[in-house]
Amino acid sequence: MTSFEPPLPVPEDDSLDAATSALVDGVATPEEAALVAASPQGVARLAGLRAVSEAVGRPGPAQDPTAAASALAAALAAFDAAETAETAETPGEEREDAPVLAPRVGSPSSVRWLPRLGAVAAALVLLVGLAVLTVDLLGRAGDPGTTTTSGDVAAAPPSPAAGRPGQTEGATAMARAEAAAVIDGGAFGNETAVEAIALRAGAAFDSPPVPSPAAATTLPADLQRCLEAGPSTVSEKVGAPLYQAEGTFQGIPAVAIAYQRDGDPPRLLLVLARSDCSLLERTPF
Amino acid sequence: MNVTGEQRAADPEEATLAAVRSGDRRALDDLLRRHQPRLWAVCRRLTGSDADADDAAQNALIAIVRALPSFDGRSRFGTWAYRIAVNASLDELRRRRRRADPGLPGDADLSGSSGEPLGPEPVATTLEPESAALTVDVDSALRRLPPEFRAAVVLRDLCGLDYAEIAEILGVPAGTVRSRISRGRSALAPLLSAGNSDNAPRRPTSRP
């Protein structure tokens, strides 16, 4: 039988109940203790309220270890991200007693600085990638078989396993740089965040998701479609995508997309089936 | 409950907190692991489901990490963390209600003094007829209690906090906490103290 249970009626304040409850907590005055003891009703109620207190205080089930590990990983990722942002904020300076953690949640300063820090970090990473690519291309001038186009670079998978035949180390570095720009994006810290995302999605990714290339225009059509369809699968307003990754989620080819959102926590992870962009997982973080 | 300097010095957790503030990731890991089970238990009792408790507890841990620089030590770390967990649970309840009915208002707080209260959660239950009269688990009973009463009872009976600490967490006077605990327990008594019909409320009731 399935039914909706009605709300419990909450009794108004009552001196006997108040005295009895205080007695359960060991904070009753002598007058309250006397009031309860003098009334058969009070004695019966004392037993009843003690039973309630014991029932509520009884330890419930323990948290699923996977979920617990996932939550811990997400919190530590937040710590790492804050530490990274803190380091980026004061390049080349000694940090004396500076808090290593992010500013208070919702503080205007954190909101104001995060996008700037992300942009600076992304620009630095891209510059390094470009330098590596230039050196690489100069060193291989005259060997057309090893050069790459910018299109190849943009389309290259940015996973650490990149380096497929025909792709130079410089191109790999560039692809990594672009992926890093996407992952950082002013909101993500490092690879730990990616692991946390995978864990948070119920540890259901068959393997950690691989970040997709930075430029949306280079995405395969199905990923692009899911990227655009993502917001319509949830009933809340989300901002621009911060991060996208490909992976296999519970055996289903999927794309993981993180969006900025209003509210706390400030980001939303969606895992969508690549075949039809149906929602497989929704996790604020 | 405010903590004096003397109490703080004697608090072994202070050393861990100091290490965390200096950037010790391992210390943070230890600190979170130590409190995680209790925080999850609170979230579990307040939200009434494992999945919602998982979300709320994770959000609480992240909020704790982000807010640690602003933790000034005036209260115990555990009390402060409970406050964050309670708020995370409340947020999760709001989200759940919005998912269930996007038209419902969600701006309520546990002080019960502003906005429209969340009210009890409608609970879908599956009960075997022969056991329905006898078996009412704690979670389903708590879910039927309005959140401001639920939080007060859980913080007292599950967490063992005193009235002053609960008052600090919920942002209400200690007298209000005492009243909510008393009234909340009385409301639960008919469900959780089986066989004791004398516990059924007989006085005028309020429907928060």
Image: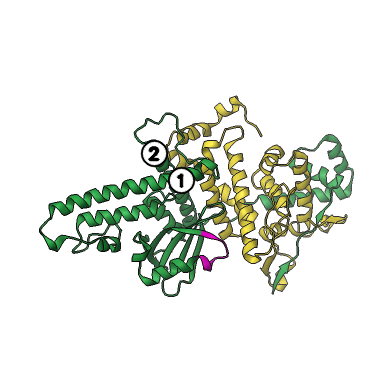
User: Is residue B43 or residue A104 the one in the foreground?
Assistant: A104
SS of the residue under disc 1: helix
Residue designated by label 2: A87
Q: Which chain is yellow?
A: B
Q: Position of residue A189 (x, y in %)?
A: 40, 48
Q: Position of residue B75 (x, y in %)?
A: 61, 34
Which hue belongs to chain A? green
Task: Specify whether residue A267 is painted magenta.
Answer: no
Which residue is at the far top? B6
SS of the residue under disc 2: helix
Residue designated by label 1: A114
State whether residue A168 appears in this view: yes
Quadrant holding the C terminus of chain B: bottom right
Q: Position of residue A243 (x, y in %)?
A: 41, 58
- The quadrant holding residue B119 is bottom right
Q: Which residues are magenta?
A: A231-238
Query: From the viewer's perspective, is B111 left or right of A284?
Result: right
